[in-house]
Image (spheres, rainbow, N blue to C red):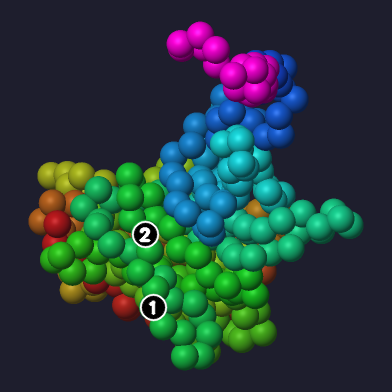
Amino acid sequence: MRRGSLPWWGAIRMMGVLVLIALMAGCSAGGLLPGHATMQQALGDGNGQRVTVVYQEPFDESRVMVLFRTMTHDGLTAALLERNTFGRWSRTGAMLQNKQLPNMGALTYGRGTLGYVEEQGSVGIEAVAIFGEILDPSITWVELTLHEEGAVPVRATVRDGLWVVQVPPEKDTTGFTVRAGNPDGLRFLAAVHSNPPRDIPPLNAPLVEYLSGQMGIRLAYPETAGTPQIDAAGRLVIGTKDWAILVDRQPRTDNPILEPAGEKVIDQGAVPLGGREATYLLEAFPEEVEGTFTYYARYLVQTESDQYELVCATAQVYRHEYWADHLKPLCDKILGTVEFIPQ
């Protein structure tokens, strides 16, 4: 045998390795290997759709939980991805892509079930991700407490302007309270009720606290109301189909005036609100059904740096006495809890 030559079996082995590498490269290029080359492709990137993965964390030994956005669904969506022995990715569970997440004031929130698709097409849930965006840049920590007896607060993972908590699968519809803040203290507090109790009159229902340091306000409202939301106009809205509290914060002006928005002013004057004096205006707007009105109790109050208009609005009311006996006491009860937080 000449110096430097390979034995015949070594040459054959080397040729086999080269052939295998060539086959693998061809399979990968032709899409024959299982899975996808990137996380984005596993989530549907391509064919005119753009997927952006904005968050990832380990779920178990082979899977990763990710949050992502797409061109058609700007809201965050949670999914599980598995990496196979070829280093390629596949999605291991069903997912419902979120639209814009509800905005509570300093945080948005959403839920995503994490698991696998069973043969019958149902989803075997292994965990539930509760997550959202942090809209108040001063917030450095987020804490979530489920609405159940003996629940212990759980600190969320906070990273890249997002917060994420995983809870057991049986808690996929359980409500929760979220607290958020920074080293100086609490900046945000809100409750998310999956199924608010409807059989309790709102005047008799326990009160739930809401706090937003960014908006500069704290108040309490009946737990029969839905989750606090920020509407398209930037106002805080809390309520039900029968009543709502709206809070609009604006820069302070030199000459605050509460102009009537309709033709029927029932009452007006000055009242205390949040330890300050507020201009008060009660208006009734006629509805399509003859003899019915929608009532708006409007309050304008100024702090050192801001100006707030608070509105207690109702659904259509047939008699003024119903407003006076049932809805006005509810408005007074909620507005009596208002505190303005110095900025």
Task: Judge whether 69 appears above or below 213 on screen.
Answer: above
Looking at the rendered image, the quarter that the C terminus falls into is bottom left
Residue to which mark 1 is pinned: 153
Residue to which mark 2 is pinned: 157
Who is closer to the viewer here, 12 or 88?
Answer: 12
Q: Look at the image and say whether residue 205 sits in the magenta stretch.
A: no
Quarter location, residue 298:
bottom left
Judge the density around disc 1: few (<14), some (14-19), many (≥20) Cα neighbours within 10 Å. some
Task: Judge whether 69 appears above or below 154 on screen.
Answer: above
Residue 2 lies, in percent from the top left, at 51, 9
Indicate left or right for 301 with 343 as reference: right
Question: Which residue type carries mark 1?
Answer: Pro
Who is closer to the viewer here, 228 or 45?
Answer: 45
Q: What kind of element bears circle 2?
A: strand
Residue 312 lies, in percent from the top left, at 45, 64
Residue drawn at x 25%, y 64% is 181
Residue drawn at x 62%, y 42% is 84
Residue 111 visible in the displayed image: yes
Who is closer to the viewer here, 43 or 226?
Answer: 43
Residue 107 visible in the displayed image: no
Magenta segment, which residues?
1-20
